[in-house]
Amino acid sequence: MNHFEKWADELKTLLIQAERAGKSEQLTVRLAAMKALSQFVSDSAPNTPDILELDALASRVRTDLVLQTLDERVAAISARSGELISIQKKFGQLASDAKHRAASINLVQLRKTISTLTDTALVLKELEAALVSDEQEKLGTELTQVVNNIQVLRNRLEELM
Amino acid sequence: MPDIAPYAEATQNLRTAVDESGKSSELSLKLLEATEPAFRDNEEFRRSVDSLRDAWRLRVATLDAVVAYVDALQELVDAGTTGSQAVDKVADHLMTLANAIGVTPASAATSATADGAKFVYGQIASIRASRSLLEALPQSNSVVTRLTQVLREDFRELEGILAVIYEAQRAALTDAHNIELGYRKGLVNARKALYAEPNLTNDQLAHLRSINEQLEGTLDWYLPFQESRARIDANQIAAHQLITATDEGLNQWALAHERLVKAAQEQRDRPPHIERLSSVVVEMKEITKRIKEL
């Protein structure tokens, strides 16, 4: 048997091993087949054109095993992505709820309301100061009433405390 | 109030570890693409790389949502422990309003009454926060458990992907030096055969010297080849260690959440046995740092 025939025979055995590895889900079986093909490329000699052709075939089969493994495992990861989107949304809801409760405990809404009343009161006072005498006559009473109402509300809020 | 801070830190570190695992995996795939012609311009390979990158981004985004949730729990705990300060802030706002409408606030509230109000509200805030935690934590427990299961399965797949990728990197490196390695192997075998001879003749000695000189001549490519090989092995070991640590981190993280639930239910201040989670988190940080240096 010459060199080429010897190595061709050996490669035939490895190709059968690779085919079985492709049908197996076990990573160790696939890796073993890949390593065996790599070893073939290292060991096969001399590096004549026909033996290099055998090496190229061994490399292609090894590449196919890599692509197949990558494809299968990425598909398995991607298959769970839909569920993760739901989980993400759920955590978003829970976070929003917790923040809302924390803000409520921190009396944030109450402080915002008081700030808005303060801003309103300041704007009204500026308006009052800017009124000329006949406008003062028409609006003065209403403006005073609104400011008084704000004061009453303020006192009620303070009582709550 | 249970101490959420260590759990919040662990959650952030877990997110970083998951992100780093994804990035280093993508880098390994890109390196293979760059160095191995069989994967360059290979549509199937490119599709898998893109799909994995997109899927992993979603994992990181989900953990971002978890980090935000745990931060919100911390806000709840803080609200519960600083209730009297909330009262002070409202009082400040009321004072500002009084000044705006030009009134002097009634002096009815004495210092003791104000302090009393703060104390009472502080207790109310603590109770409200405890109740809120008691409602929130069990609601999230099943989601935390399921998320952990999904991520652990993902990491098992990732480990398999990386095993074949690193094997392919090694194979690509060896294939690229196939002819030179064959030549060097011939020299090494010839030298071995001469070493086995009991008494070398002068010609054999001259041949041995020549072989050694030729072997010396291969070092300019052989040493870089060995370094590249060692780098692939080191990268694979680091990636495997990160995956193993993150897997354990996920397990401990889920357990720590269950203990938080229990601590909230039993109104304990410090959840027990978070030490194991903390030590795994330290391990993950160290490995992540090492991977960035590689």
Image (spheres, coloured by chain):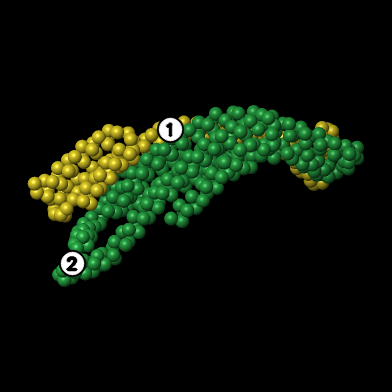
Chain colours: A yellow, B green
Q: What is the x, y in percent for residue B258? A: 59, 32
Residue at mark 1: A80
In the structure shown, which secondary structural element does the residue marked by tag 2 occupy?
Answer: loop
Drawn side of residue B248 relative to residue B228, left or right: right
Where on the picture, by quarter, is residue A68? top left
Question: Which amino acid is tagged 2?
Answer: Leu
Question: Which amino acid is tagged 1?
Answer: Arg
> Among all residues in the image, which is located at the extreme left?
A1
Report whether residue A34 is seen.
Answer: yes
A63 in relation to B289, above or below:
above
Q: Are marks 1 and 2 on the same chain?
A: no
Q: What is the x, y in percent for residue A65? A: 28, 40
Drawn side of residue A125 relative to residue A57, left or right: right
In the structure shown, which secondary structural element does the residue marked by tag 1 occupy?
Answer: loop
Label tally: 2
Separation (CA) of disc 1 from disc 2: 68 Å
Q: Label 2: chain? A: B
A75 in relation to B102, above or below:
above
Write the residue at 88% across / 41% down.
B111
Where on the picture, by quarter, is residue B273? top right
Drawn side of residue B80 relative to residue A139, left or right: left
Q: What is the x, y in percent for residue A48? A: 13, 54
Q: Label 1: chain? A: A
Image quadrant holding the C terminus of chain B, namely bottom left
Residue at mark 2: B200
